[in-house]
């Protein structure tokens, strides 16, 4: 159907930047700069500066940023890694695929991992915690870092949804041993396909990740240091991302403005719970604008029928997918979220009129 308001508008997004993006791509193609060239190095420098770390290493997905981080940190069989149950499957797959055991914990009201649950989940085998800064809001890293110091744990941040979000003025991806980002097209900074990066202050981790992404090879000496992968960030994608990174702060401000319009238009409407969690320590960037209601399925059907495109992120808990082999769990908040959440249209291109249409349509559902 033709939506009146689309969830995202990748065509509009491209056309707004067409000249700059086309020029960057033509620059790569006409020079034959395809693999590990200047554009990749420059994007990595700019990304590290933006996040506030010494290094950034471009890879071909958020998944591989997580996967290489865990390998570089030496996490493997016999180790437990605590991770929130309410996250994208890739967070957990990365842990499983290094041979470690993911220990799923429940989340709190702001959709981020419940730190009391993290404390309860600690065992002598716990090697690391993977906070996931979900929907563009950073976890309480002060408390998590204190816990990590006390119990000698590594922190691998899944910051795939939180590029540019801050906690006490520090950006997501700058707290842990590594920060892991995804540039999947519909993340706040999106490539034209899969892409990702990890950030770190640790030189050894950066070197190891650079080798892991390129078959274990040291590009200067030609020495293979171990068996690695082929999961480099393409130079052309890096060139595009470098252009877009310059616009990111403005886009994040626009997302916050849209979130504020939703807050003003939808506060107190029906049983809706909005994703605004008063606390001056956080700068949320609204990768997703997630609302909660007991009438979720009805509201989703109504909005779709009225031409407003919405999404539901994860209709059943990860452990209910038996093929993942995660076993049974009893995590009531994660289960309730699966029944109650939907995401409203949110992107930097959406105009005020479209936001008003969404607000009016939601209000009509409840009044009518
Ligand atoms: C998108 C995402 C990832 C994985 O990113 P890909 O680039 O798709 O591999 C990991 N974790 C979270 C929370 C994500 O949203």
Image (cartoon, rainbow, N blue to C red):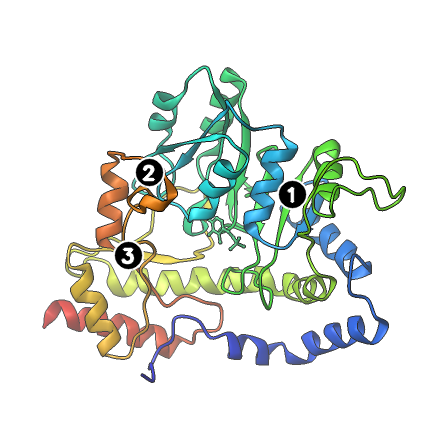
In front of the other: 312 or 267: 312
Determine which of the numbered discs, if any, sits on residue 139 in the image. Answer: none
Q: Which residue is mark 1?
A: 199
Residue 247 in the image: state x and y as whole percent: 62, 65
Q: Which residue is mark 3?
A: 291
Residue 285 in the image: state x and y as whole percent: 47, 54
Residue 15 in the image: state x and y as whole percent: 58, 81
Would you say 257 lies left or right of 204 here?
Answer: left
Secondary element type, mark 3: strand
Q: Residue at x 25, y 40 (%)?
A: 333
Q: Residue at x 26, y 50 (%)?
A: 338
Q: Are marks 3 and 1 in contact (CB under 8 Å)?
A: no
Compared to residue 347, the image places residue 76 above or below, namely above
Q: In the rendered image, which quarter is residue 170 located in?
A: top right
Secondary element type, mark 1: strand
- Sequence-earlier tag: 2 or 1: 2
Residue 47 in the image: state x and y as whole percent: 68, 52
Q: Which residue is mark 2?
A: 107
Would you say 19 lies left or right of 61 here?
Answer: right
Compared to residue 248, the image places residue 6 above or below, namely below
Q: Residue at x 29, y 72 (%)?
A: 358
Residue 155 visible to the viewer? yes
Q: Quadrant of the C terminus?
A: bottom left
> Alpha-carbon neighbours of circle 3 within 10 Å: few (<14), some, or many (≥20)?
some
Secondary element type, mark 2: loop
- Sequence-earlier tag: 3 or 1: 1
In front of the other: 158 or 32: 32
Residue 173 visible to the viewer? no
Q: How far apart are labels 2 and 1 at the CA level?
A: 25 Å
Q: How far apart are labels 3 and 1 at the CA level?
A: 31 Å
Q: Residue furthest left?
A: 368
């Amino acid at each position: 159907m033709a939506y009146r308001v689309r969830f995202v508008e990748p065509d509009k997004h491209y056309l707004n930047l067409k000249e700059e993006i086309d020029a960057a791509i033509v620059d790569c193609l006409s020079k034959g700069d395809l693999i590990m060239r200047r554009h990749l190095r420059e994007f990595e420098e700019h990304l590290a500066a933006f996040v506030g770390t010494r290094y950034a290493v471009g890879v071909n997905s958020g998944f591989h940023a997580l996967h290489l981080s865990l390998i570089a940190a030496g996490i493997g069989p016999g180790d437990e890694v605590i991770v929130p149950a309410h996250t994208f499957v890739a967070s957990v797959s990365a842990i499983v695929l290094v041979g470690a055991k993911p220990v799923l914990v429940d989340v709190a009201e702001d959709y981020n991992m419940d730190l009391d649950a993290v404390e309860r989940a600690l065992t002598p085998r716990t090697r690391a915690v993977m906070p996931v800064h979900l929907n563009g809001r950073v976890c309480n890293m002060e408390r998590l870092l204190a816990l990590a110091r006390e119990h000698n744990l590594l922190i691998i941040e899944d910051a795939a949804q939180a590029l540019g979000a801050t906690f006490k003025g520090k950006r997501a991806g700058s707290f842990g041993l590594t920060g892991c980002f995804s540039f999947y097209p519909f993340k706040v900074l999106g490539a034209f396909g899969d892409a990702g990066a990890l950030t770190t202050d640790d030189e050894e981790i950066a070197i190891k990740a650079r080798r892991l992404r390129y078959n274990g090879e040291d590009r200067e000496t030609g020495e293979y240091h171990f068996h690695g992968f082929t999961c480099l960030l393409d130079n052309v994608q890096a060139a595009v991302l470098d252009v877009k990174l310059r616009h990111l702060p403005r886009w994040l401000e626009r997302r916050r403005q849209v979130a504020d319009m939703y807050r003003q238009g939808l506060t107190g409407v029906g049983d809706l719970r909005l994703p605004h969690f008063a606390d001056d320590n956080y700068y949320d960037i609204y990768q997703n604008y997630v609302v909660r209601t007991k009438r979720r399925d009805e509201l989703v059907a109504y909005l779709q029928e009225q031409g407003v495109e919405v999404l539901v992120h994860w209709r059943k808990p990860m452990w209910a997918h038996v093929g993942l082999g995660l076993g049974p769990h009893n995590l009531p908040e994660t289960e309730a979220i699966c029944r109650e959440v939907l995401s409203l249209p949110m992107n930097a291109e959406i105009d005020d009129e479209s936001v008003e249409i969404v607000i009016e349509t939601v209000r009509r559902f409840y009044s009518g």
